[in-house]
Amino acid sequence: MAARLRDELEPLGEVTSKPMFGGHGIFCDGVMFGLVDSGGTPFLRIHEGDPDAETPAGTERHGRMPYWSVSDDVLARQDVLLERARRSLDMARATSRR
């Protein structure tokens, strides 16, 4: 799944993955904005409390981390996946600059 996400999200920039905690971290230009857990479920970062952040219906949080699962419906539509990933990346970049 990490390789698939790298390919699908390539329009965002240099998307890479790195093995972490039994899964993979998903990065763009060195900023982590997603992950794939050990079971192969993809997650994208969402910052709770951010007025522009929205927790997609039907998704699950990854533990206590600010990452929420990506539904099969989103994975099936690259345009929707890219938009959600773009928002996640923008939020991750903004947080990393603080």
Image (cartoon, helix red, strand yellow):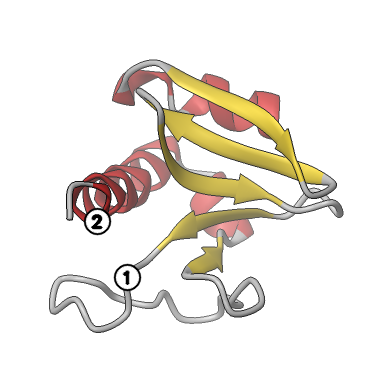
**Who's the residue at 55% across and 71% down the image?**
65
Residue 25 image point, x, y percent: 61, 40
Instruction: Please report whichever mark, 2 or 1, sits nearer to the chain's N-terminal start.
Output: 1
Vertical position of residue 17 compared to residue 87: above or below:
above
Mark 2 closeness class: few <14, some 14–19, many ≥20 residues within 10 Å: few
- Amino acid type shown at disc 1: His
Q: Is residue 27 above or below residue 64?
A: above
* Quadrant that contains the N terminus: top right
Disc 1 element: loop
Marks 1 and 2: in contact by CB < 8 Å?
yes
Of badges 2 and 1, nearer the viewer stands 2
Task: State the image coordinates of residue 66 (x, y, percent, origin top left).
Answer: 47, 70
Which of the two residues, 40 or 18, is positioned nearer the viewer here? 18
Judge from the rendering whether residue 12 lies leftward or rightward of residue 57; answer left or right.
left
Q: Which x, y percent locates residue 70?
A: 56, 59
Residues at marks 2 and 1, CA–CA distance in whole angstroms: 9 Å
Q: Secondary structure at mark 2?
A: helix
Residue 47: which numbered mark, if any? 1
Q: Which mark is residue 95?
A: 2
